[in-house]
Image (cartoon, rainbow, N blue to C red):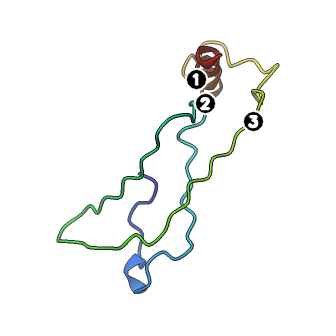
Amino acid sequence: MILSRRPKDDDSKDGFTNWPFMTTHTWGENPRGKWRLLVRFQGEGKHRGTLKRFTLMLHGTKEPPYSGIEPLEGHPNSKLNVVQTAHKRMA
């Protein structure tokens, strides 16, 4: 979930116009392949909406930005360790 319910979200009849939805949940993952945008209304009652436009923008680096940094010992699930492991698999 990128955007959860917030107070006063219902105030604008225009909805989210030119609103950037961003996430870092895919750091360390290979961006190649098919991407799919999934929009889902959750909560009580029936909801409707119109998606007028969206843009997918990916950022990355040619070389791993963590070169020379060692993950914390004893923390195999640290973010750095997870990203390094993913990059080794892609190499």
* Residue 26 sits in quarter: top right
Q: Which secondary structure lies at badge 3?
A: loop
User: Looking at the picture, which amino acid does disc 1 mark?
Assistant: Val
Height in image: 43 above or below 2?
A: below
The numbered mark, 2 or 3, whose residue comes first in the sequence reads 2
The numbered mark, 1 or 3, whose residue comes first in the sequence reads 3
Height in image: 34 above or below 8?
A: above
User: Looking at the picture, which amino acid does disc 2 mark?
Assistant: Gly
Whole-percent x and y of residue 75? Answer: 59, 18
The reply, left or right, for residue 65 in relation to residue 73 is right
Comparing labels 1 and 3, the label whose residue is closer to the camera: 3
Q: Which secondary structure lies at badge 1?
A: helix
Q: How many numbered circles does the render carry?
A: 3
Is mark 1 in CB contact (under 8 Å) with mark 2? yes
Q: Which residue is mark 1?
A: 82
User: Looking at the picture, which amino acid does disc 3 mark?
Assistant: Thr
Q: Which mark is residue 28?
A: 2
